[in-house]
Amino acid sequence: MREVAIIGIGDTRFGELWEHSLRDIGMQAGLNAVSDAGIAGEQIEALYIGNMAAGSLIDQEHLGALVSDYSGLSQLHIPAVRIEAAGASGGMALREGYLAVASGLHDVVMVAGAEKMTDVTDEEIPMVQMAGGDQQWEGIAGATMPSLFAMMARRHMHEYGTTREQLASVPVKNHKNGALNKQAQYQRAITMETVLKSPVVADPLGVFDCAPVSDGAAALILAPADAAGKYAQEAIRIAASAAATDTLALQHRESLTRMDSVKVASTKAYRTAGVNPKDIDVAEIHDSYSIAEIMSIEDLGFFEKGRGGPATLEGMTEINGVVSVNTSGGLKARGDPMGATGVAQAVEIARQLRGKADKRQVTDAEVGLSLNVGGTGGTSVVHIFRRA
Amino acid sequence: MANPRYWRENPSRYNLIGKRCENCGTVHFPPREICPKCRRKSIGKMKSHKLSGRGKVYSFTIVHEPMPDFSLMKPYIMAMVEMEEGVRLTGQIVDCEPARLSIGMEVEATLRKLGQEGSSGIIRYGYKFRPR
Amino acid sequence: MMFGHGEKDVGIVTYGAYIPRFRILPEEIARVWGENGEAMKNGLMIFSKSVPYPDEDVITISVEAARNALARADLDPEEIGAVYVGSESHPYAVKPSGTIVAEAIGASHFITVADYEFACKAGTAAMQTSMGLVSSGMAKYSLAIGADTSQGAPGDALEYSASAGGAAFIIGKEGVIARINRTLSFTSDTPDFWRREGQPYPSHGGRFTGEPAYFRHVATCAGELMKVQGTQPSDYDFAVFHQPNGKFPTRVAQQLGFEKKQYETGLTTPYIGNTYSASMMIGLSAILDVAKPGQKVLGVAFGSGAGSDAFDITITDEMENYNKAAAPTVKSLVERSELLDYGRYAKFKGKIVMKE
């Protein structure tokens, strides 16, 4: 297996992109990545698209051909495929692109993630989100994705004494970071009071504990690490790519207070990269819900089980804290266009490791990690990145 | 949803019919043909098993942004119920004041409407829970 | 030959009732429609009525009642040979309620099932059919259910009474707790109340529902049954009549010569409203909740359109061994309640036009 590097990154702003279709934003992110890498379209050998729900959101499948076509690559007839693993689609697409280059099958590939969520009404969103869980047995019973995470939160509070304020400290931190990110959906800080007083979605979680509905796209260009020197930008090495699955339904989990897929994927990734949790300088974590970030920073080994809440409230995950978590603003503030999220996480880590993260730059960031989660942890994808 | 997708699961939705692995004794719901603990050893040894319908609340939430089928009932209670047989089920709790809810509360299964395909389509029925 | 002669040993093997827990007061309905709530309450003798939750309908209510009946009896549901659900508010115009009920109680697939409709007496018609099947040996047990989530047009007098509930009786010859000595019906074409296909709310003949309909049918049927049985009101420990409101059954009981102590036990409408097909059957269930071996019960149902079914019943010694405590009593079902305002009531009953 060859070492693989990120040689180009691109994204669109995340948010309510009323004037742009899925085709537009997929193309825009791809174009940005290609020009960032300083390559020509002809050099791209294959395309991997992370997308969760275009079929139910815009009645469009077959996104490999669509994105390839609208990126101007139709005459090149390259292989292109859409990868789906619910909210972890983007991370899984990155893993597929990584495998293609690592195996030697391809030299230069594009990994993109795109989702267009605002072309359906608000009432349809819970059904689309719940398709990442067990729709047939939990969704039909009335469970929404926030309600499943709310039950995890209540259990976490019950078992570890996690408090409402500790949960709220996640979106407060992530909005503070998002305010420094020009690509973020919400570029404004919020107070603890705002979170605590926000309308309840599924108690104890309120509107501000939940990632928003977003449109957006992100893209990466991957190439063999040994050839990375010939491209325009500082290459960022992918030191590990690991994925794990778990039961689809939350009702079948052994525990509601941890995500075993996160534990398994991160353990593998640390071993492959030869690093420990404490070596991670900057991490993009799947904070689809405030409780998800708290559980994840525990399951990733950043903090002991039960300490995720206090650690966040005490500021240990702020920029230049013990570990800088979600410097982009995370899913909460940067936005969560589901299939784009996993790719956008890698874009942010690459920016950090290149030292190009502007006002939110983590000092001397050397090692970064991304965690992309599908459903309530049915799939987890962990990537570890290093400066080349 | 076309009717067959729901219809084939009626025995489980009406009467909580799951499967018991004869190899390790674990009860599963909904039915599955392979026990995740025993895998190969469980093949051909998964027998139908009717749950008692009694259990305890393992976790719960009050849903204010509902699935479309339940908008008339919002806010409604979703719970994770640990059944007597050890298996957990995600389901609603009805006939219960939210203030009464607690982890460990005893509940039992009941049959309620779970939705319908518009005003002219099929009505779906299935289990919910209520305080015992 | 007059209908109703059967074998001597057929009767109720077990029973169960169900009443949704929501209630609305007549004062609250009257407040919305500019009526005199106090006058409505006293005129109808209805102090509150039951309202189903949006996820409850005749099928879920029937299943609850039938499961309550099964919980009390040592009876294999696979031995039930027939299931009849009587209602005027079946969720489907075409597709039986009974098939869903049968599956949900674990009955065999080798059974006969049908839905009945006869305004408020479809449940007792199901009881009579069941008696016939059991008497003839065609079925070992037959399940007869009366259940309704009845409708009253907004602002109509019916809105003060039309409520929801159900009762299930398993009829058989083995383990009979209440022997049905005889049933008898009186039927005529009397259009006092009706609902046309596709119409959401029923219509009624106003005062025409009284003398020529309810009182004539109930009194004639009860009188004829007592004549055939050679009994008189004083022979019965309990009497229960169809209860479109609190007033009609009280008046007909008094006309027939029954005293308050005989009819008060089965009079549930003042607290839960008119449960239509379940009305007399819930009243009878309330009596079975307290009746002792040897006691006699007269039960008379009425369905608009019109007809009455009367039952002469004797409680057997089996009642002593019967596991009554395995399911809730009517009293406990009446007592568990949560009050609604008219807005939530209208939402629960689907009276608000919603966006599809």
Image (cartoon, coloured by chain):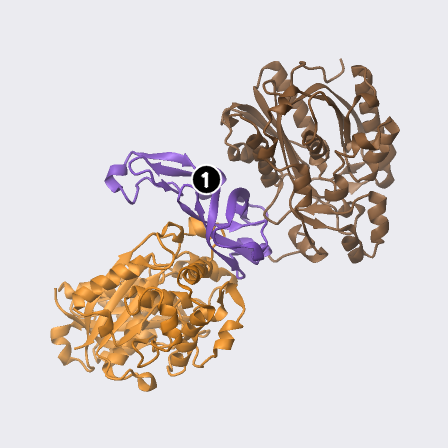
Chain colours: A orange, B purple, C brown
In which quadrant is the N terminus of chain A drawn?
bottom left
| Vertical comparison of B41 with A87: above or below | above
Q: What is the quadrant of residue C142 in the picture? A: top right
Q: Position of residue A338 (x, y in %)?
A: 38, 66
C99 and A363: which one is in front?
Answer: A363
Residue B3 visible somewhere in the drawing: no
Report crowding for label 1: few under 14, some 14 to 19, many 20 or more residues within 10 A (C-alpha): many
What residue is rendered at 44% in x and 38% in y?
B51
Query: Where is the C terminus of chain A found, in terms of image quarters?
Result: bottom left
- Location of residue C308 with respect to A139 vertically, above or below: above
Q: Tell me where residue A326 appears, x and y as whole percent.
A: 34, 75
Residue C62, how many percent across, how many down?
60, 36
Circle 1: residue type: Leu
Above or below residue A246? Residue C268 is above
Q: Residue furthest bottom?
A: A359
- Residue C332 drawn at (x, y percent): 66, 41
User: In percent of the image, x 58 and y 51: which residue is there?
Assistant: B96
The residue under label 1 is B16
- Which quadrant of the figure has residue A60? bottom left
Determine the secondary structure under disc 1: loop
Q: The disc numbered 1 marks a residue on which chain? A: B
Number of marks in picture: 1
Question: Residue A112 occupies which quadrant of the picture?
Answer: bottom left
Q: Is residue A76 left or right of residue C194?
A: left
Residue sitting nearer the eye, B7 or A366: A366
C333 vs A60, left or right, is: right
